[in-house]
Image (cartoon, grey):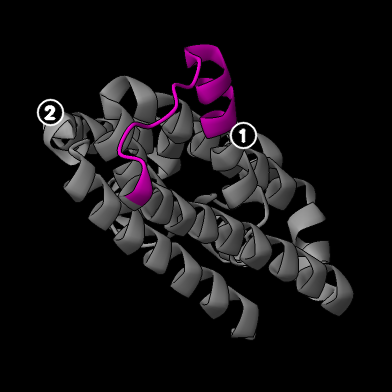
Amino acid sequence: MELVALLPAFVLAVVLISASPGPAMALILRRAAVRGFAGARPTVLGLEVGLYLWALFAAAGLAALVAASGVAFLVLRVVGAGFLLYLGLRAWRSAWRGSRNPVEPPTGPTRGSARAFGEGVMVMLANPKAAAFMIAFYPQFVPGGWPLFATTALLALLQVAIEIVLYLTLAALVGRASGWFRRSAVRRRLDAVSGTVLVALGLRLAVDGR
């Protein structure tokens, strides 16, 4: 019953955290705008797999080791920042190429889905802030005397379920206008803006301290 009493606060915290802007939101919005709802689903699932893994790492103590190790934290921060910069530069390149060639080369659905899923996992796992967040967040909702790993795994499943519903709803709303977003001029502007956001997030992660 202790856990049940804590659930409303946990759900509210998850909703507020999920709605905050960041790399996850930027990826989902861009993917839904360009590829529609179906194209955004692998990105959402990849992000949630990465989140669940971090939750398990936190429960097992691995996330604490990463957060405590200056070298590990720095390496993960550099990798995460580099990947966000890569995604941002790729969006910029798409905007520049689109201005010269409005016809986008087709991408196979399987290959595109696998890449979107991988990007989601990578963005979440390569974010050291996620490790620090998990360490601070979940213990608040684990009642005294309850097994840490099992309770964290259960709470993380609830968070994943909530975020999947929220993010897929957002992707569905944006995806309804994907035909408009795919117009050549609109797509170029979208790529330029999303690329700028991702580059800014990457630079912020690179220069941010703990």
Residue 195: in magenta span: no
Where does residue 169 sit, x and y in percent of width and height?
21, 32
Figure quadrant of the N terminus: top left
Q: Is 77 positioned to the left or the right of 205 in the image?
A: right
Residue 193 lies in quadrant: bottom left
User: Label 1, label 2: how many angstroms apart (C-alpha)?
Assistant: 24 Å
Residue 2 lies in quadrant: top left
Where does residue 162 sit, x and y in percent of width and height?
33, 35
Amino acid carrying label 1: it is Gly
- Give the camera-side residue of 142 and 129: 129
Residue at numbered disc 1: 118
Q: Is residue 152 visible?
A: no
- Give the camera-side residue of 174 and 130: 174
- Considering the numbered disc 2 on the image, is that residue within a helix, a strand or a loop? loop
Magenta part of the protein: which range? 100-117
The 10 Å Cα crowd at callout 1, few under 14, some 14 to 19, many 20 or more, is some
Q: Is 65 positioned to the left or the right of 167 in the image?
A: right
- Considering the numbered disc 1 on the image, is that residue within a helix, a strand or a loop? helix
Q: Is residue 111 above or below residue 172?
A: above
Q: Is residue 14 above or below residue 79?
A: above
Residue at numbered disc 2: 176
Q: Is residue 49 visible?
A: yes
Q: Is residue 19 above or below residue 51?
A: below
